[in-house]
Amino acid sequence: MFLTGGGAILGVGIVTLDLVNQVESYPVEDAEIRALSQRRTRGGNVANSLGVLSQLGHVCRWVGTLADDDTSRWVCTDFARQGIDTSHAVVHPGGATPTSYITLSRATGSRTIVHHRDLPELDEEAFARVSLEGVGWVHFEGRNPVATGRMMDRARRFAPGIRVSLELEKPRDGIEVLLDRPDLILAGRAYAEALGFDAPDAFVADLMSRTQARLCVAAWGAAGATLAVRDGAIVHVPAEPPPCVLDTLAAGDTFNAGVIDALMRGLEPRTAVGQAVRLAGFKCGRIGLDGLV
Ligand code: ADP
């Protein structure tokens, strides 16, 4: 079966405080407008995907860096609420929890993000101390390429059969060094467009030709997703929109969780991506990431 795997899922990435303002429509520069609603949530791509994976019944661990401020304590409480183990996180005294200021437009469903961070990234020395006992799948955010590559190598050395997935959300200097390591690459439209692709099929074909991955998937917003299987066909899966799009924030993180979950359960790639598209579409009809199952 294709990329099936048991065991716990270890997610490696950043965690943020997301301050989300919903507005009627996105403001013009220098305007002053009132938000329709405001919420404070835990963010970070892999952290979000773990939140969905734990709802889907997986044993999840998160590793990344934490500040030692009140917000990071709140973040850990929120991870614990979802049953996600953070005991291997690395605390940086004096650091500040990264924050994303997010404006959600009710008119279009768009989400505009201003991110602030002043906290070191996880390095490979810290990752070397993280227990991989019982871990069947490691999911990485595509950042900090050299260190991330070494972390992937360590995971493979620890257990050659361990599954490794990589999210490529947007272009980052040197990120291509990671392409020959993962089993699964989950790419976003921003990454594809930065490389000059305006259609997902040509993009996944190109991506597959540059990797050793067995499956490459491109999420393409309201258009759905496209997958390329090694030595197989390129298939497009249309989106499954909800009756009303309320919140597309973290749709991609939900989608990535859906693909990983379905593959771990032994589904074939086309079916797995179909399941992920359905889950992400369902999420877009709801505010936030709770209650997806
Ligand atoms: P991101 O949140 O990273 O920007 P995308 O916008 O590409 O991610 O969305 C990820 C997946 O969520 C898409 O592949 C699609 O299946 C689903 N999705 C996103 N926006 C919509 C929408 N407006 N209607 C239905 N499904 C959507």
Image: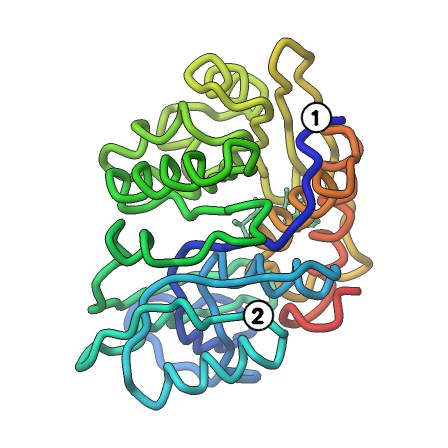
Out of 243 and 227, give the one closest to the viewer.
Answer: 227
Looking at the rendering, in which quadrant would you find the C terminus?
bottom right
Mark 2 or 1 closer to N-term?
A: 2
How crowded pointer 2 is (Cα within 10 Å; few <14, some 14-19, many 20+) is rated as: many
Q: Provide residue 72's location: percent of width, then percent of height.
A: 37, 81
Q: Is residue 153 above or below residue 43?
A: above
Q: Is residue 76 above or below residue 226?
A: below
Q: Is residue 33 left or right of residue 138?
A: left
Give SS at disc 1: strand
Q: Are marks 2 and 1 in contact (CB under 8 Å)?
A: no
Q: Is residue 69 above or below residue 273?
A: below
Looking at the rendering, in which quadrant would you find the N terminus?
top right
Which circle, 2 or 1, is nearer the viewer? 2
Looking at the rendered structure, which numbered label has been put on residue 84? 2
**Residue drawn 59% across the image and 45% down it:** 136
Out of 204 and 146, give the one closest to the viewer.
Answer: 146
Give SS at disc 2: loop
**Residue on which the image places disc 1:** 236
Q: Provide residue 200's location: percent of width, then percent of height.
A: 56, 26
For the residue with label 2, is its CB less than 8 Å from the closest atom of ligand 1?
no
Q: CA distance from mark 2 to mark 1?
A: 33 Å
Q: How is the image coloured?
A: rainbow
Looking at the rendered structure, which numbered label has been put on residue 132? none
Q: Provide residue 165's location: percent of width, then percent of height.
A: 51, 39
**Residue drawn 70% across the image and 60% down it:** 283
Amino acid at pointer 1: His
How crowded pointer 1 is (Cα within 10 Å; few <14, some 14-19, many 20+) is rated as: some
Amino acid at pointer 2: Ile
**Residue drawn 25% across the image and 67% down it:** 117
